[in-house]
Amino acid sequence: MINDVMEELYIKYYKELYLYAFSLCKDHHLAQDLTSDTFFKAYMSLEEQDSYIKYWLFKVCRNLFIDLKRKDKEYLSDDYVERLEDKSVTPLYRMIETERKRELFQEILMLKEAYKEVLILYYYCDFSVLEISESKNLNEGTVKTLLFRGRKKLKKRLEENNGL
């Protein structure tokens, strides 16, 4: 039974969790390790969790990354995040859209940590403002402010780089 629950969680949250892990460490292999370790921790303590498992998974992933960071290792890489397959009409359009999304994601990664994390959770992981506020222990107004300022800074960066 627990294996079925874990399989369902893995299928449901792997891509979002991987993307979040990648946004933290900017390394494909480390993001995979963080994601795997997060699911391992979930497996070990699944019975203790309540209905907020998604938030808990993201918090575990972040804490694992912080633990690794504390060990004073460098985890930066030029690897790019793997994108979900786009269901566009033509291969050329699909290629252009994929490149635009990659460039946008790279620009988000260049923002300050607070903006970056909130934007990724909101736009890439489909967290609501309330869900972000609960998972990051912030009030909703703070999350809205971070989203607004993050979008503003992202727009400015894009304009400086001739946009996407």
Image: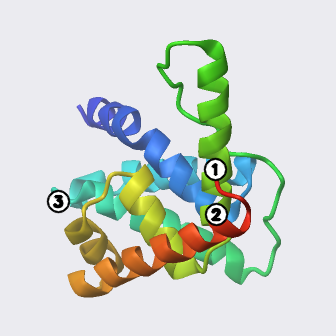
Q: Residue at x 68, y 38 (%)?
A: 99
Which quadrant is the N terminus positioned in?
Answer: top left
Tell me: 3 left or right of 86: left
N-terminal of the pair, mark 1 or mark 2, is: 2
Q: CA distance from mark 3 to mark 2?
A: 40 Å
Q: Residue at x 27, y 76 (%)?
A: 133
N-terminal of the pair, mark 3 or mark 2, is: 3
Determine contact: label 3, label 2, CB under 8 Å.
no
- What type is the residue that disc 1 sits on? Leu
Q: Compared with residue 123, is residue 2 higher up or lower down, i.e. above or below? A: above
Give the SS element for disc 2.
helix
Q: Position of residue 132 (x, y in %)?
A: 30, 70
- What type is the residue that disc 3 sits on? Asp
In the rendering, which numbered label is found on residue 88? none
In the image, 6 versus 73, the foreground residue is 73
- Res. 64 in view: yes
In the rendering, which numbered label is found on residue 164? 1
Which is in the foreground here, disc 3 or disc 2?
Answer: 2
Q: Residue furthest top?
A: 90
Q: Residue at x 30, y 85 (%)?
A: 138
Q: Compared with residue 9, is residue 134 higher up or lower down, i.e. above or below? A: below
N-terminal of the pair, mark 1 or mark 3, is: 3
Residue at mark 2: 158
Give the SS element for disc 3.
loop
Q: Position of residue 62 (x, y in %)?
A: 51, 69
Residue at mark 3: 50
Q: CA distance from mark 1 to mark 2?
A: 7 Å
Q: CA distance from mark 1 to mark 3?
A: 41 Å
